[in-house]
Structures are given as C-alpha cells and as structure tokens.
Amino acid sequence: MSIATTQASGTVTAPWTRGLVEIRGVSKIYAGHEVLHDVNLTVRPGEVVAILGPSGSGKSTLLRTINHLESVDRGWVTVDGELIGYEQRGDRLFELKEREILKRRTNVGVVFQNFNLFPHLTAAENIAVAPVALGRLGKSDARELALGLLAKVGLADKPDAYPRQLSGGQQQRVAIARALALQPKVLLFDEPTSALDPELVGEVLDVIRDLAKLGTTLIIVTHEIGFAREVADRIVFIDAGHILEVGPPRAGLRFSAAPTHQRIPGTRALRRVPGHPSTTHPAQQHSQQKLTEIEAHNGN
Amino acid sequence: MTDTVKEHRSAAPTQDSPQIVNRDSPDFAALKVVHTRHYVRWIFGALVLFVVLQFLCSLATNDKYGWPVFATYFFAPAILKGIQLTLALTVVSGTIGFILGTLLALARLSKSPILNSVSWSFIWFFRSVPLLVQLLVWYNLGYLYPRLGLGVPFTDNYFWSFDTVTLVSQFAAAVLGLSLNQAAYSAEIIRGGILSVDQGQLEAAAALGLPRHVRVLRIILPQAARAILPNAFNEIIGLIKGTSIVSVIALGELFYVTQVIYNRNQQVIPLLLVSVVWYIIFTTVLSVAQFYVERYFARGALRVVPPTPIQAARAWVNTQWARLDEKPEAPEAATTRIGGNGS
Ligand SMILES: Nc1ncnc2c1ncn2[C@@H]1O[C@H](COP(=O)(O)OP(=O)(O)OP(=O)(O)O)[C@@H](O)[C@H]1O
Ligand SMILES: [Mg+2]
C-alpha cells in the first residue's frame, strides 16, 4: 500500500515538493490563561515531526494555529513563507478575506481525532466534495480521484459506504484520503489513533508511515511513542505551553546527542548553557523523565 | 425425531478436536421459540376497538351528519375553487416563509451584530403580534400608507409609486401575513436544527477550505434537516389549516367558501364536514410525504434505513401469521429439536 496522489489523468506525481512550516514566538491566551508560551518551531519540507506532551499541554492548540483554525495572540505562523490569515503589504499586515484564508488553508490538511467525516455523504463523496467545491476537478474526475485514494488507503471496496457503516480505523483512513484529495503541502494529525480500538491502530499507522516515506511534511500529535520514535525525524515535547525538547527520536532525547540537534532560536531546551557545554539543561532532564513516565504508562 | 438428534450429534467435533464442546448441552438454535401471550394487551385492544366501532356506527346511522348534503357539496365547483386558493396560499406562504426563515436563521447565527439583531427583532416582532391582527393590518395598509414607492427620503415626493390598495390585494395581504409569521417561526426551527450539528463538522469543512455556501448547503443544512423536518412538517400542516384564518379578510379559501354556503342553506354540520374531510386529506398526504422525506435524510445517519409502512405491515402480518402455528400446550414439541430450519 503506497500513497501518491493520482491525478485524474492517471499519472502519479509527488506534489509535496515544499511544505516549510515556521512557527515564531507564538503565544495563545484563553481567558487569561496562557496555553502556548512563546513557541518556536521550524519544520522543514518533507520532515516528519511528532509532538508529544501531557494532556492539556497545548498540542491541539498548536496544531490549530498552524492552519489558522485558531488565531494567535502573539507571534506568527507561515507555510512556505505565507501567513495563512494575513498578507504583508509594505510594513502592514492586512487581514485576509475569508475566501483567501480558505484557499491558503487548503495547503494544510488536517486529520482529526474524531475523524469528523460528513455522515450524510458516502466515503467517496467525502473525499470528492472539496476538490469539486473548490473548482479544481469536475464531478467525474473527482470521483475517480476519490476511488484512487480509497484504493491507496486499502478501502477500494468501500466507496459507497456511509461513515457509520465503517469501522473506526476505516473511517480514519477515509479521513486521511479526504485530507490528501487537496494535495496539501503539510498534513496535521491530531491524535489520529486515540479514538480507535487497539487492534485498529495499526492499519491507520501503516497509512501514515507510507505518507512519511513519500516526503509529505507531517506534524503528528500522538501518544504512540513507539510509532513516533520509528517514523518521526524529530520529536517535540510540549509541557504547559512550552516546547521542552526538540531532537531526533533515536537519540532518546538525550542532551549528549546535542550535536545532531537542530538548533532552533528561542527553544529553551536546545539552548546550551554558555560556558557549560556538557551540563544537562534542567528542562532536558524534565522531559526525559516525562517521556519515561509516559512510556511506562503506555507499557511500551 | 430421535434420529435427527443422533445425526446432529455425530456431526459434533471428534475427540481429538481442539475445541471444547460440552456434548450434553442442548443445541438452542434448533429449539422452537414459543412467544408470550399478551392477554392484558389484547383486552385493552378489544376495548379500544369497541369504542372506535361504536363511533363509526354512529357516523353511519345518525342522519344529522347529513351525508347526502355532504356528497352534493364535496366536489362542488365553489368548494374546489376554495381548495385551489387554500393550496396556493399554503405553497406560496410556506415557500416564502421557509426561505426567509432560513436566511433569518443564518443571520441569527452570523457574527455580524447588525444582522444578528435585525433577525432577532424580526422574529421577536412577528411572534409577538397575533396573526389575526397582522392580517387585518396588512389588509388595511392602504389606510396607513395610501401610496408606496420610491422617492426623496422623508418627503412625499415620489419618482415612482403605487396605490397601496391595488398593490396589496386580499391575496397579497394574506400571503404577507402568513409568510412573515411563518418565517419567524421557521427561523427558530431551522436555527435549532443548525445548532444540533456537531461543531467538528464545521471545523472539518473549514479545514478543507470549503466556501461558505458549500458549507451551509452541502454540509450543514442536510445534517440539520434531520432535526428540522419533524417540526417543519408540523408547521406546514399547521399552515394549511391556518390558512382558514384568512377568512377574516373575506378571501375565498376553503373555509370561507364553506361558511358562505352554510350561511345560505343552514346545513352547518355537513358543510363543516366537507372542509374537515378535505383538510384531513391534505394532512394525510403531507404525513406520508413526511415519512419518505425523513427517510431520505436519514441516509448515513442510521446503519439500517427503517422499512416503509408497507414493508413493516407485511413483516408484521407474516410474523403474526407464523405464530398462529404455535402450540404452547405441548411441552414436548417445545423441547424436541425439529431438525434444522427446513422442517
Ligand atoms: N476554547 C478554549 N477556551 C479556554 N481554554 C481552552 C480552550 N481550548 C483549549 N483550552 C485550554 O488550553 C489548554 C490546552 O488545550 P489543548 O486542547 O491544546 O491540549 P492538548 O495538549 O491537545 O491535550 P490533549 O492531549 O488532552 O488533547 C487546556 O488547558 C485547555 O483547557
Ligand atoms: Mg488535543
């Protein structure tokens, strides 16, 4: 099962040549409570980043700011250099018209924890609705695209099933196919498997694994640490709205692996303490401990 | 019978089979089910049936119902014309009412404070003033504003204008009253339906970059329809009978015509029956339509689509028919296996 977007003409292309996400100094405040605190993160094109963190730490909020489902109170987020909600002209930022925001949003696909498929549309219709509504494809081309994508997520035999007639894992795979239909540059996953029974988790992770190989930029919030270690290029740990750790998964989030770390300005976890290159940063120890805790809890 | 039992047992897994089978437990699948007899239910059913029959009998025997008069007038040309007008009023006011109601509901839910408060005020006003009063005011609009048209604001200089009385005919007054009133009520019904749609649906639609009109028409309203439809049909049925209220402005719809006729010939009951039976026919048609429309919008919402009444009735008759064969007084019959489904 491999995934590449089949265009209506039948030629297979890998459209994800770009997909650079830059998050700079982002803060989000809900009713006086700072949910995200000065978050900085750069995700390179084609990179797979897993975001881990305890419940309520702001993972979902961070994802939602990336495609402007949530506006930020400070800082900014760009995808390939474009602000999703605003446009720069001279020294001013102009808030974009809804139509334009929607258009830019299609660069970023989202897969939700609860699938959020449209229950009154069949699997194929769920996938075809956006390309048709945005005038990218005609009805029959869109259906063909939908059938192709369904085949790629292993659901070639279910185009006319309604979401409620599908299992949770099948629904989530349809949701992934739906997000792919717009050929996004970046795909966001918010706990894509946490609403699934354990035996259904694997089939969804398989699909994501294939996407990762194809070079789509993926940002995945997950509690599946084993999966994150395996598939992600980097793991980001968030606690109480702070980014604690950015590092390659195999290094076990050890500060000793610092030379391979990407240095990201403003990310507390990676800032070496001046003059003490071998000292472990307190935040590092903290996140390492957190990770071990979660792993112990998950039993893997 | 015993043979079938033996035959069946020999088909059980052999000694070395890994499955654990209790050979002494009966095969429940092969047993015949004997259903409970609902004696109390039957007694009450019989009582209700008796009352209904008594009433039907009185309908036939009590000559004050005047069925011959009923028969002469049921298809009378005057009555048919009245029906035409009743249906026209319902269709026109219902359509305007629901379209305007949808717009009002969307305005109520929009982020614009102006749209929001205009919509709220409209609903507030038209739900507050009795329909009867509204109809009389629209009918007498010419008294308040003799001319309507375009001109210099706040003056009486018109570029282009109409005589109010010719513009707002009886029919127009009736349509205005009914449809504005209907819009106010259906706005709230539609708003309720929209609110019942899961927030995640809106988020998913927004994340896919769907334009607003697609989100409303293709994603939200079809899902809201399930909550809207039962109330909407209530409203339409209410409207079709509610048109009888426009008889106050002497518009010749079904009920007005009926009144005119019985005032002339004094056959009050037979003529009221004429209009009642017609109203029953209309609501029956609407009720049947409601079932099928709701069934259509249930697609995807239910794993299995409910059967149509005809399918349900046929299934009921079949099961009842099958149960007639049961013999509850023969315990052996109930415990002996009957050798598979075939016999
Ligand atoms: N609309 C809101 N209004 C107020 N507070 C909110 C709102 N949305 C989220 N929060 C708060 O923001 C914090 C972060 O929420 P978020 O959903 O991002 O957490 P999370 O890391 O995704 O958690 P989980 O793993 O449980 O999904 C929480 O404390 C939450 O209570
Ligand atoms: Mg979350």
Image (tube, coloured by chain):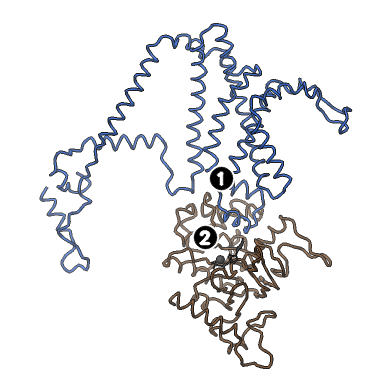
Residue depicted at x 45% and y 53%: A165
The furthest residue to the front:
A32
| Residue hosting label 1 | B224
Judged from this view, the residue extending furthest toward the left is B2
Q: Is residue A107 visible?
A: no
Q: Examine the rendered structure and indicate whether residue A63 appears above or below residue B330.
A: below
Q: Chain of mark 1?
A: B
User: Disc 2 designates what residue?
Assistant: A114
Chain assigned blue: B
As measured in the structure, the alpha-carbon distance from the residue carrying label 2 to the one carrying label 1 is 19 Å
In the displayed structure, would residue A197 be above or below residue B54? Answer: below
**In front here: B162 or B234?**
B234
Report helix, strand or loop for mark 1.
Answer: helix
Q: Is mark 2 within 8 Å of ligand 2?
A: no
Q: Is residue B297 visible?
A: yes
Which percent across, then down, holds residue B198? 55, 52
Q: Residues within 10 Å of mark 1 (few under 14, many from 20)?
A: many
Of residues A105 and A94, the one nearer the viewer is A94
Name, please, the residue furthest toward the top: B265
Q: Which chain is brown?
A: A
> Does residue B181 appear left or right of residue B35 in this picture?
right
- Chain letter for mark 2: A
Q: Give the image location of residue A141, x and y in percent.
A: 60, 54
Q: Amino acid at mark 2?
A: Asn
The amino acid pointed to by label 1 is: Ala
The residue positioned 59% from the left and 76% from the top of the image is A236
